[in-house]
Image (tube, rainbow, N blue to C red):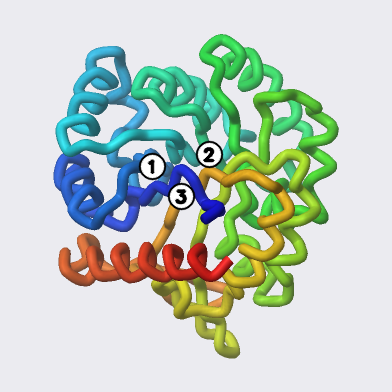
């Protein structure tokens, strides 16, 4: 069987409110081999930039190995157009490399600050080259939105370390449910390095994030599109079931989620993807 998603990681943001050590243990207990550690500004920071050092990296790497996990991607999301965030991101690149990650995923920033984004990417590329770290620019409804709209920026940079991290849920949410994700993702195939598998339900104005396979995203169609890549795509499962609200305003449930609820969401989502791949 040709695996569509390999390696497949679970993001620690599902276990927001739990310690990193607890999150890693839970992820391993759900049958995952890989973890994507969250250092997401203003959302979930299992490792904060202020704590990042060589010693901290060694400690985190030891925690990962202790539970039998590995890491491929690191969630280092910031606004790359803001100077303080840029400084944090440069630290995150070094930290991600130190724990063994090959790609660091991030937001880009508002389209109104495109000039700042372009300028700051020069420093980011220099740091990426220093640590041989791929930069996964994530579809997030801003400078990097749909693949069709924003692949032009990847072409502009034209650098082997500047890649696309396609987020299914983000793309669908920020288009207010109007984008066909399975078709849109094809526009970035040349630069596609990683995918965030995230499901979401939009009913009228009401938004709910859910287990993979329970929302509006047609993952069977996404899988069919990805077959033409001819190789497995590194993937991260993001299951922010604590997020809900409206098209205009999302809010987060009080963290942490009851642990059995979080683990059930992880296991059921993993099983859905395994069944999906078996049908290909």
Which of the two discs, 2 and 3, labels the residue nearer the N terminus? 2
**How far across and down, in percent of the image, does residue 165 sit?**
61, 45
Task: For label 1, count other residues whose C-alpha is less than 10 Å away and answer few (under 14), some (14-19) or many (20+).
Answer: many
Q: Secondary structure at mark 2?
A: strand
Q: Secondary structure at mark 1?
A: strand
Tell me the distance, in whole angstroms, between the alpha carbons under discs 2 and 1. 10 Å
**How far across and down, in percent of the image, does residue 105 sit?**
53, 39
Task: Locate the C terminus and report the quarter of the image it occupies.
Answer: bottom right
Q: Is residue 106 above or below residue 202?
A: above
For the point 77% across and 56% down, which residue is it?
Answer: 186
Q: Which residue is mark 3?
A: 236
Q: Is residue 110 above or below residue 102?
A: below
Tell me the distance, in whole angstroms, between the alpha carbons under discs 3 and 1. 7 Å
Q: Is residue 18 visible?
A: no
Q: Secondary structure at mark 3?
A: strand
User: Decide: marks 3, 1 in contact (CB < 8 A)?
Assistant: yes
User: Decide: marks 2, 1 in contact (CB < 8 A)?
Assistant: yes
Report the residue that reaches farthest toward the front. Answer: 1
Task: For label 2, count other residues whose C-alpha is less than 10 Å away and answer few (under 14), some (14-19) or many (20+).
Answer: many
**In the drawing, what numbered circle is on residue 18?**
none
**In the drawing, what numbered circle is on residue 105?**
2
Tell me the distance, in whole angstroms, between the alpha carbons under discs 2 and 3. 10 Å
Residue 5 vs residue 94, the one in the foreground: 5
Q: Which residue is mark 1?
A: 36
Q: Is residue 262 above or below residue 228?
A: below
Q: Is residue 179 above or below residue 78?
A: below
User: Decide: marks 2, 3 in contact (CB < 8 A)?
Assistant: yes
Q: Is residue 46 visible?
A: yes
**How far across and down, in percent of the image, does residue 73 sit?**
45, 36
Quarter assignment of residue 66: top left
Residue 186 vs residue 157, the one in the foreground: 186
């Amino acid at each position: 069987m040709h695996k569509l998603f390999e390696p497949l990681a679970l993001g620690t943001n599902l276990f927001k409110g739990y310690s990193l050590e607890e999150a890693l243990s839970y992820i391993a207990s759900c049958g995952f081999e890989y973890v994507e550690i969250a250092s997401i500004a203003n959302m979930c920071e299992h490792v904060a930039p202020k704590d990042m050092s060589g010693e901290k990296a060694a400690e985190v790497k030891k925690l990962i190995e202790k539970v039998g996990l590995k890491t491929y991607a690191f969630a280092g999301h910031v606004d790359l157009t803001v100077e303080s965030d840029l400084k944090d991101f440069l630290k995150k690149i070094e930290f991600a490399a130190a724990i063994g990650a090959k790609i660091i995923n991030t937001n880009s920033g508002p389209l109104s600050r495109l000039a700042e984004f372009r300028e700051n990417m020069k420093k980011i590329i220099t740091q990426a080259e220093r640590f041989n770290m791929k930069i996964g620019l994530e579809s997030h409804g801003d400078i990097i939105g749909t693949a069709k709209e924003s692949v032009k920026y990847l072409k502009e940079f034209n650098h082997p370390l500047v890649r696309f991290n396609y987020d299914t849920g983000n793309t669908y949410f920020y288009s207010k449910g109007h984008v066909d994700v399975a078709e849109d993702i094809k526009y970035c195939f040349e630069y596609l390095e990683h995918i965030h598998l995230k499901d979401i339900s939009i009913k009228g104005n009401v938004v709910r994030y859910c287990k993979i396979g329970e929302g509006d995203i047609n993952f069977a169609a996404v899988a069919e599109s990805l077959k033409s890549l001819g190789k497995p795509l590194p993937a991260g499962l993001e299951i922010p079931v604590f997020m809900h609200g409206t098209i205009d305003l999302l809010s987060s449930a009080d963290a942490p989620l009851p642990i059995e609820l979080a683990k059930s969401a992880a296991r059921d989502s993993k099983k859905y993807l395994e069944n999906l791949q078996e049908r290909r």
